Image (tube, rainbow, N blue to C red):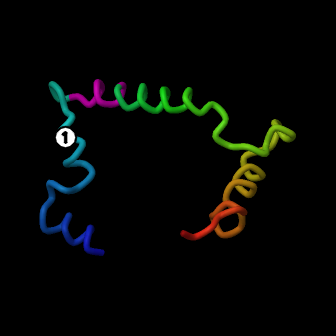
């Protein structure tokens, strides 16, 4: 709640306002490409982030969601720290 109140008190803290810090000539294209490259590089660093699905490569989206997040939206092996 404090974060939302801060955003109401200071609109420069909103996600849209923080994006505007990356605007170049009225566009976010260079920022978007930079972020895409960043995500791609991280994906290449860890090409198999999910283990245990090798035996079921044809799993549909609902099955995958259930296996990853379980009934309550958390992985079956989720441990609160």
Image quarter hosting the C terminus: bottom right
Question: Residue visible at 19% across and 68% down?
Answer: 6
Q: Is residue 17 shown left or right of residue 40?
A: left
Residue 39 falls within the magenta-colored stretch = no
**Residue at image mark 1:** 20
Magenta stretch, main secondary structure class: helix
Q: Is residue 46 shown left or right of residue 40?
A: right
Q: Is residue 25 above or below residue 71?
A: above
Q: Is residue 27 shown left or right of residue 66?
A: left
Question: Residue visible at 24% across and 42% down?
Answer: 19
Q: Is residue 42 above or below residue 74?
A: above
Q: Secondary structure at mark 1?
A: helix
Q: Is residue 1 above or below residue 35?
A: below
Q: Residue furthest bottom?
A: 1
List x then y, in percent, for residue 7. Answer: 20, 64
Q: How many marks?
A: 1
Rendered image quadrant of residue 1: bottom left
Residue sitting nearer the eye, 47 or 61: 47
Rendered image quadrant of residue 28: top left
Rendered image quadrant of residue 52: top right
Question: Which segment is the magenta one?
Answer: 27-33
List x then y, in percent, for residue 45. Answer: 55, 29
Question: Residue visible at 79% across and 43% down?
Answer: 53
């Amino acid at each position: 709640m404090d974060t939302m109140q801060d955003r109401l008190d200071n609109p420069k803290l909103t996600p849209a306002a923080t994006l505007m810090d990356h605007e170049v000539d009225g566009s976010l294209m260079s920022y978007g490409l930079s972020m895409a490259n960043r995500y791609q590089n991280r994906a290449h660093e860890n090409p198999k982030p999910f283990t245990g699905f090798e035996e079921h490569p044809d799993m549909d989206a609902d099955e995958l969601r259930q296996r990853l997040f379980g009934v309550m939206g958390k992985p079956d092996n989720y441990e609160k720290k």
